[in-house]
Image (spheres, coloured by chain):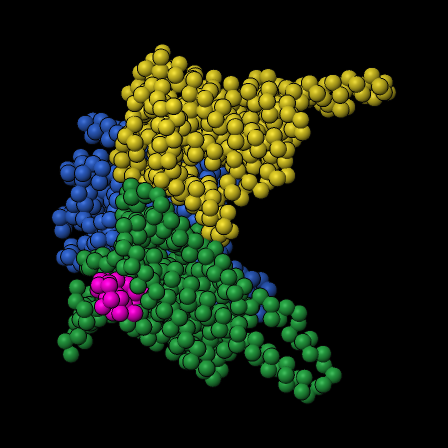
Chain colours: A blue, B yellow, C green
Amino acid sequence: MDIVIEIATTIVAQLQKPTLAFLIGGMMLAALGSKLEVPEPVYKFIVLLLLLKVGLSAGISVREANLVELAVPAALAAAAGIAIILLGRVTLARWRGVSEMDGMATAGLFGAVSASTLAAGMAMLDSEGIPYEGFIGALYPFMDIAALVTAIVLARLSAERKAARTLQGAAGGAATMTVGGGGGPGFDQGFGGDMIKGILVDTVRSPAISALLLGLAIGIFGRPESVYESFYDPLFRGLLSVLMLIMGIEAWQRLSELRKVAHAYVLYGIAAPFAHGLIGFGAGLIAHTLTGFSAGGVVLLSVMAASSSDISGPPTLRAALPEANPSAYVGTSTGLGTPVAILSIPLWIALAGAVIGF
Amino acid sequence: MDIVIEIATTIVAQLQKPTLAFLIGGMMLAALGSKLEVPEPVYKFIVLLLLLKVGLSAGISVREANLVELAVPAALAAAAGIAIILLGRVTLARWRGVSEMDGMATAGLFGAVSASTLAAGMAMLDSEGIPYEGFIGALYPFMDIAALVTAIVLARLSAERKAARTLQGAAGGAATMTVGGGGGPGFDQGFGGDMIKGILVDTVRSPAISALLLGLAIGIFGRPESVYESFYDPLFRGLLSVLMLIMGIEAWQRLSELRKVAHAYVLYGIAAPFAHGLIGFGAGLIAHTLTGFSAGGVVLLSVMAASSSDISGPPTLRAALPEANPSAYVGTSTGLGTPVAILSIPLWIALAGAVIGF
Amino acid sequence: MDIVIEIATTIVAQLQKPTLAFLIGGMMLAALGSKLEVPEPVYKFIVLLLLLKVGLSAGISVREANLVELAVPAALAAAAGIAIILLGRVTLARWRGVSEMDGMATAGLFGAVSASTLAAGMAMLDSEGIPYEGFIGALYPFMDIAALVTAIVLARLSAERKAARTLQGAAGGAATMTVGGGGGPGFDQGFGGDMIKGILVDTVRSPAISALLLGLAIGIFGRPESVYESFYDPLFRGLLSVLMLIMGIEAWQRLSELRKVAHAYVLYGIAAPFAHGLIGFGAGLIAHTLTGFSAGGVVLLSVMAASSSDISGPPTLRAALPEANPSAYVGTSTGLGTPVAILSIPLWIALAGAVIGF
């Protein structure tokens, strides 16, 4: 009972903090039909600065980190990303009215990580004075890439099996058909290693991951402390408040797209952030036991797992799974997954406080 | 005589301060044919941040304000907005060569408030160390909405009367005409409460007012102090200097549009900010006498009254008064009203210093 | 030998500093095919803020400067700009496979100054705690305008002579031809004073020079210290890091354009920044001897001379020399000249340290 009260208190207090207040404010503006818009270039610039900030601070920490302390949470982050996809495969992707391709694309986005949500989690921990590992941003690509690669590989394999079955059936019924004509040349090419390599390259080249990796690299190999402390860090919270406003407006506008798709997406968009956050929380607890990973780190691993990709994921999926319907996966992720994930951050803070203690 | 010298000294000193120096610099650049441009998305972003800043700081103050202290200046701000429109109706709108519709639309813009001009006034008071009520930004929507609603209602009523007269005359002259054909169905519909509600909704949904109200709401119901102090407040003066540069360039470019319209607009654009500022000063003096409203607050009420809307007003007027000619009202407001209002700020500071004392 | 070691140590240390780390990071991202882009309006805004910063700080210093102390380096800066063009005329513009027009346009860009490169030099000196004259930004237009005007005048004169020769030859071969028909009316008009005035006006109206002059004017005639210290100065290094990232990406992308032009451009793009930097260094040494110009000032004069114009130059050249091929001069300047100039900054620091001492 105490836990429930503690969680409820934390949530109410966090709703007043800038991060959530701007998110909710944005949703209310959009709901009231406000014509307020933040221009696209400004949105891209803010996201770039936040990703560089997260990358730089992680890189500076990685430089001095014990590599074992980093390797355990990194492996667990990747495992959490894969677990989220496997969960999506046996739930959303099997739902009546949901095509397997659309379901796997949606699971892929929910397994990938949102830099904005992670940044919101960091800002909330900072404002509470809760410490966490500096290298935490370096875990982002492990979970993100593991989830996207798993989702795309599983979706492609399943599409291939289905096509093969259709072909067999067709060949059996009409013996005159040229076998292989349906599959076409190169049907089996580019699979396995090549496909995974292609997805990896696409993901690493995506704007979000490459900005994060750039920050990481400069943090590790350069000496960016001066510019980090005079620019990236002080502007962080303010830019995040504007980003939350944009995401609130965007979330409300995307919600309407969900009317066109199966109800399963609405259920998934609301429930998945909680389920995935618990997977991340579990992974964090293992790291806490094995290497003394901090309670703040456990919160941020939960937040990463609960989040769904808003920048890097959609174009990667569109390229790799062109058959999937973007208004299903983007609508579910941006309209429901992201705001639910951001609003659930206080839950992970309260849970870590109750289970581990700060 | 002393007052004149004091005012002159204040004005010269203020011309060197960043706010006016950048405004004049922008006008000179444009006059010299410079190709310097500030991209539109940057302009929108700066205005958004300034409006959020003004709203947040007002909201934080409203939380602790005595509601009576707030109600008196709010009612007086609304009254000043209405008085400005009534003045415009008996001057500009009656001028030879000015259509009543165009005249009322121009008066509406001059009655509405410019966030940039208000921000410039705040920056000048801050740099002089002159205090003012924190809730002052909360007065903005009262004056703005009162002026826009009054202008649009009066213009619509007058257009209706004119149409009715034309109809009567036509009906008298040609009895065969189908009565009501000129007015069309629904001619009398949507008037009164519905029309006012429509204008209110449109104004509140406009980008400027909704950004300001969002800042107010987050300031009142949230706890945005940390982000306000680390981001919105420190960036305020710098962003304002860029905004003044943009407005100077824009003002000079718009001036040329005034060549196409009646001379009355030029006279109105130059004289109205002074007349309206005096109306605002009078309203402020009443508030000062009734509730001890500060001298700095009186200055800002004068500045609001002197200013003319540059962001929220034009689209609202275009929607509500489609017959009015935008190059008349936008040209007069952006080309003359706004720069004159900004340049007149030192006058209100000097006047308040002389009449009330800081 | 000691100098070589000292220079090498300085260069390695500087490569880790934010300015060069972000430049190299941007080039590596582009080389790896990253899709990261910084929106154009953001780029323009950052450049505007840096130019205003450089202008304001120079203006504030000019206000208190001894005019002789300023006049000597200004004259030497202009002389260096002219020397760079004359050097380009007897090297690149005479190369086999390089048209004289293209060669002079390229020399013009390399003689003109890059605000980003100058800003990078200032940031590196600041981070080393090396002092330099505050008015240094005021030297920028002297070198920039001198170089552009010289390059354009020489290119135009040479084109005129060539046209006259062709005409004579044609007239000799075919006596029936109407002399003057090839040149057309006004062939000799607009030359001399008028042409130089036209180039001057175009250069001063270009976005970069007019932003710099605006900052200078406000710094000299206004009192912008408060906004300079609270906004332009603190944001300087952070914005510069983003600008370096953009320039690194852009440089790599432009490199491919050089495949289409003569090899001479590649050689010039790599060697010229070093040769021009030495010209600037020599001019700085003279100023150091004559007026005690600081070692930091000598570094920045070398950096200005080594840099090639990325913003103001190209449109001016396009207007004045429409026959020249932009992918030759812009490709050489943005793809090679700018990154080589920025990467060579540590060389000038080390050289000034060894020759003059800090």
Image side of residue C175 versus residue A21, left or right: right
Question: Which residue is painted at 35% across and 12% down in the image?
Answer: B289
Image side of residue A144 versus residue A190, left or right: left
**Compared to A162, does B109 lie above or below?**
above
Front-most of C264 and C126?
A: C126
- Range of magenta residues: C283-304
Residue C141 sits in quarter: bottom left
Look at the image and say whether residue C292 sits in the magenta stretch: yes
Look at the image and say whether residue B31 sits in the magenta stretch: no
Majority secondary structure of magenta residues: helix
Front-most of C234 and B62?
A: C234
Question: Which residue is painted at 49% across and 82% down in the image?
Answer: C97
Q: Is residue A89 in view?
A: no
Question: Which residue is painted at 60% across and 34% down in the image?
Answer: B328
Give residue A21's position: percent from left, percent from top: 33, 32
Q: In which quarter of the image is the C terminus of chain C?
A: bottom left
Give residue B358's position: percent from left, percent from top: 30, 23
